[in-house]
Amino acid sequence: MDEKQLLELALKLGFADAAVINTEELVFVPAFRSLCEENLCGKYGVNYACPPDCGTVEEMKKKVLHWRQALIMQTMWDIEDPLDSEQIKPAKTQHNQLTRQLIDQAGIPGLMIGASGCSLCSPCAITEGKPCRFPKLQYSCMSAYCIFVKEMTERCHMDYDCAPGITTFFSMYCFQERVS
Ligand code: SF4
């Protein structure tokens, strides 16, 4: 499946917008790691796909740059308050499920980056001292990779802040393996 077909598939599945970016154009900001440490999402230290267990910023960046391109997917939601976790959590779950659906239909190898940290199990097996239950399906979020999302949307000509009362989420699928 090529770039054009991936974009068509994303829109067909219901994403509000989609774009493809060269991974070398992404901006990584190591200082964002401190935002994860504030643990507003509640996943810091209790999820294999989140810091500190997911890896260092440098290791995460390397995982992304292993792939040449990334499909960026956006959904929009009628949510007034982006901090309203009762509405945000299920919406992010739906966004991540739609992302997985696209990946399954695309059928090409790659790396999923979610709109939130992995929520495939509740709680994550790390809290029970057990290995990850779905290591091939687990995904980290853009924050765990320290990706500067606003900058990314500008480079892709996508809307970061859509309108008052609308909350947007982004996920990514990195594809086209870089062969060294
Ligand atoms: S798949 Fe389950 S065990 Fe693995 S990181 Fe995700 S929530 Fe944790």
Image (cartoon, rainbow, N blue to C red):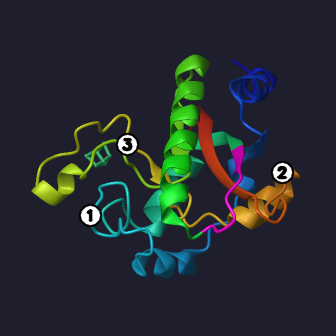
Q: Which residue is mark 1?
A: 46
Give the label on residue 6, or none.
Answer: none
Of pointers 3 and 2, the one earlier in the residue sequence: 3
Of marks 1 and 3, the one in the foreground: 1
Residue 89 in the figure: left or right of residue 163? left
User: Which amino acid lies under the numbered mark 1 shown in the image of this protein?
Assistant: Val
Callout 3: CB less than 8 Å from ligand 1: yes
Q: Total marks drawn?
A: 3
Say whether residue 78 is visible.
Answer: yes
Contact, mark 1 vs mark 3 (Cβ under 8 Å):
no
Q: Which mark is residue 156?
A: 2
Which badge, 1 or 3, comes first in the chain's sequence?
A: 1
On the image, the x and y values in percent for residue 104 come to 52, 21
Given the image, on which type of amino acid does mark 2 rest? Answer: Cys
| Element class at badge 1 | loop
Q: Residue at x 44, y 60 (%)?
A: 59
Quadrant, the N terminus: top right
Q: Which residue is mark 3?
A: 138
Assess mark 2: CB under 8 A from ligand 1? no
